[in-house]
Image (cartoon, helix red, strand yellow):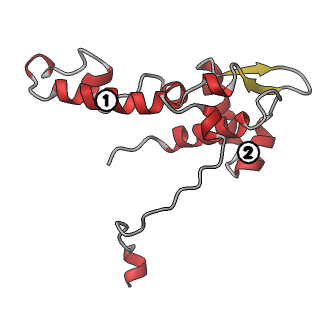
């Protein structure tokens, strides 16, 4: 299964929270309290997102962080890239050309590039503004397997 890191997942939650009040300065304690993530983790995430130019730090007694652009101008690809420190890539060759010694003779590289482009396009097609809106979708539970603990 392909999965982003827990820190990146929390980064999307932090950014979504900030997008709900985009013109306000938010501090780590407030964000942590509202999204139920430890303050130390939120502080780390805020710094990473600021280094990725998605947040603007505000110094002083009433300091914190604000979005560097409007939520409609920030995509999920932007957030994930900032958190991961590099562009989204499902394989090394899809995001870092030259990183694999098999690259020049790989028969599946082109197909992985197509898949990577499709995933990146999907992430780039969803804005932070959209993420900040509740999305009510029915969950199809027919494909879920019961946990081992539930079966015991």
First in sequence: mark 1 vs mark 2: 2
Question: Can you give x and y, in whole percent of width and height, for residue 11 in the image?
Answer: 59, 37
Q: Secondary structure at mark 2?
A: helix
Question: Can you give x and y, in whole percent of width and height, for residue 133 in the image?
Answer: 66, 43
Residue 116: numbered disc: 1
The crowd level at tag 1 (other Cα within 10 Å; few <14, some 14-19, many 20+) is some
Q: Quadrant of the C terminus?
A: bottom left
The residue depicted at 37 percent of the width and 67 percent of the height is 144
Q: Badges 1 and 2: C-beta atoms under 8 Å apart?
A: no
> How much space separates mark 1 and mark 2, taking CA atoms?
33 Å
Q: Which residue is mark 2?
A: 32
Q: Secondary structure at mark 1?
A: helix
The residue depicted at 62 percent of the width and 17 percent of the height is 53
Question: Can you give x and y, in whole percent of width and height, for residue 140 in the image?
Answer: 42, 64
Q: Quadrant of residue 49?
A: top right
Q: Is residue 41 left or right of residue 149?
A: right
């Amino acid at each position: 299964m392909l999965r982003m890191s827990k820190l990146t997942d929390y980064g999307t939650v932090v950014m979504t929270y900030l997008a709900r009040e985009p013109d306000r300065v938010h501090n780590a304690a407030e964000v942590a309290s509202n999204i139920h993530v430890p303050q130390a983790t939120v502080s780390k995430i805020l710094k990473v997102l600021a280094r990725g130019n998605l947040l603007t730090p505000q110094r002083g007694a009433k300091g914190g962080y604000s979005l560097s652009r409007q939520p409609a101008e920030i995509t999920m690809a932007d957030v994930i890239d900032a958190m991961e420190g590099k562009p989204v890539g499902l394989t090394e060759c899809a995001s870092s050309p030259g990183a694999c010694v098999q690259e020049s003779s790989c028969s599946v590289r082109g197909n992985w590039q197509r898949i990577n482009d499709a995933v990146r396009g999907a992430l780039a097609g969803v804005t932070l503004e959209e993420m900040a809106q509740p999305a009510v979708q029915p969950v199809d539970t027919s494909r879920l397997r019961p946990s081992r603990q539930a079966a015991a």
